Image (cartoon, grey):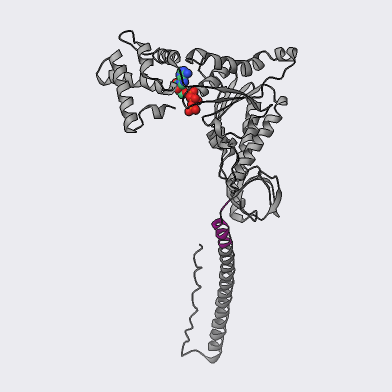
Amino acid sequence: MSRSPTLPDRPTLELDPESSPEERLAALRDHLRQLADVNDQLQEQLSAVRDHRADLREEVDDLQRENETLKTASLYLATVEDLSEDGAVVKQHGNNQEVLTDVSDRTRERVEVGDRVTINDSFSIQDVLDDETDARAQAMEVDQSPSVEYADIGGLDEELREVREAVEDPLVNPEQFDIVGVEPPSGVLLHGPPGTGKTMMAKAVANETDATFIKMAGSELVQKFIGEGSRLVRDLFDLAEQEEPAILFIDEIDAVAAERTDSKTSGDAEVQRTMMQLLNEMDGFDERGDIRIIAATNRFDMLDSAILRPGRFDRLIEVPEPDQAARERILDIHTRGMNLAEAVDYAALARDTEGFSGAELESLTTEAGMFAIRDGRETVTMADFEDALAKIQREEENGTPGYAAYVQ
Ligand code: ATP
């Protein structure tokens, strides 16, 4: 706020009692002129202060209006298409409606064409969102060359063969499909318990085909703002197109593709819209070139049948818990880099770990290593594995999650 202007000095009149009447008259006239000057200055200051007060009132009104707008929940997401004297043209995500809306001075300072903003029911801009690329980066994992190889995956030979057939062959040998005259499967759906190697398989195929691995969790697609989920789906496919050849891996697909329930909340409608966008993108897939899509779920039973129709996720591959032979193989794989004191009896360990997932077996080997370190040893013994197993089983009985819970 500007400071009050300094007031002009008040003129004083000192009359000499000895002076003649003419001299007194002149002095009085002079004094009157000075008083008139001061009066002018004061008038000027008064009108400046009045102007300032009017400005402040306007600012207070603006802020009050903005405050009211901010107090109502921000629900919709939009992109600023144009900014002009008249306001901003915003395009609402989801329904692509374009609207001209008023922009407060404060917002105008922060907003640029192309920004994503939140708008309320009356389309007034409430907030300017972070850079789109940041949001993308947060939601998607992009790996130009994942390090997982087929040899890192224990068991799952048949499942891996099927994934390679559906994903690798169309990328590496597309002519084969033309010659035989069949369309390669659009999408592959891996389903099975957590930690059994679904993500690993997708990464390994990306690695072996020199494709970029792009991962997004279905739960990330379920967004707070209306229209945001479908926008992310579009972004995801656009990114895959830029990065092709690419493997698009959508984990937890059930988050957006669960069977419809009877509830009709706006949240459900938004999830539904996101799934429709996903199906649309998959339907227009043929023109997309070298992009293969793999989805995964632990909740196959919950999926909406629309997502399983031919031309969509039409290759379903169950990824089971590892059997005895697979458990032995997984233990072998995860102890490859370990300094073992003696031959570890994988068969015995595999027998004792029925029901363990690959991720849990990996955590068992890490726990065994921790026992050796705690003992001050540089090598890991069979006894360490047995101790680790006992510890994990104890934790399971007590219901306290051990390391296994954190490695997935
Ligand atoms: P989720 O359903 O929880 O996403 P997932 O099935 O995708 O799990 P992954 O992320 O592939 O499981 O596996 C987690 C970790 O468990 C892997 O990084 C790997 O170390 C280990 N693992 C799981 N399955 C296997 C396997 N078959 N062979 C070797 N390691 C495995």
Task: Name the residue nearer the viewer: 397 or 280.
Answer: 397
Q: Residue furthest left?
A: 375
- Please report the residue visible at 45 percent of the width from the left and 15 percent of the height from the top: 326
Q: Position of residue 36 (x, y in %)?
A: 58, 79
Q: Residue furthest top?
A: 343
- Please report the residue visible at 30 percent of the width from the left and 25 percent of the height from the top: 391
Is residue 10 among what the camera can see?
yes
Q: Is residue 175 magenta?
A: no
- Please report the residue visible at 53 percent of the width from the left and 84 percent of the height from the top: 27
Q: Is residue 4 above or below residue 249?
A: below
Q: Position of residue 37 (x, y in %)?
A: 57, 76
Q: Is residue 136 above or below residue 262?
A: above
Q: Is most of the magenta stretch helix, strand or loop?
A: helix
Q: Is residue 64 magenta?
A: yes
Task: Name the residue nearer the viewer: 154 or 148.
Answer: 154
Residue 21 placement: quadrant: bottom right
Q: Position of residue 296 (x, y in %)?
A: 55, 27
Magenta region: which residues? 62-74
Residue 81 placement: quadrant: top right
**If the image is split into quadrants, where does the C terminus sit?**
top left
- Please report the residue visible at 49 percent of the width from the left and 83 percent of the height from the top: 13
Q: Position of residue 386 (x, y in %)?
A: 30, 18
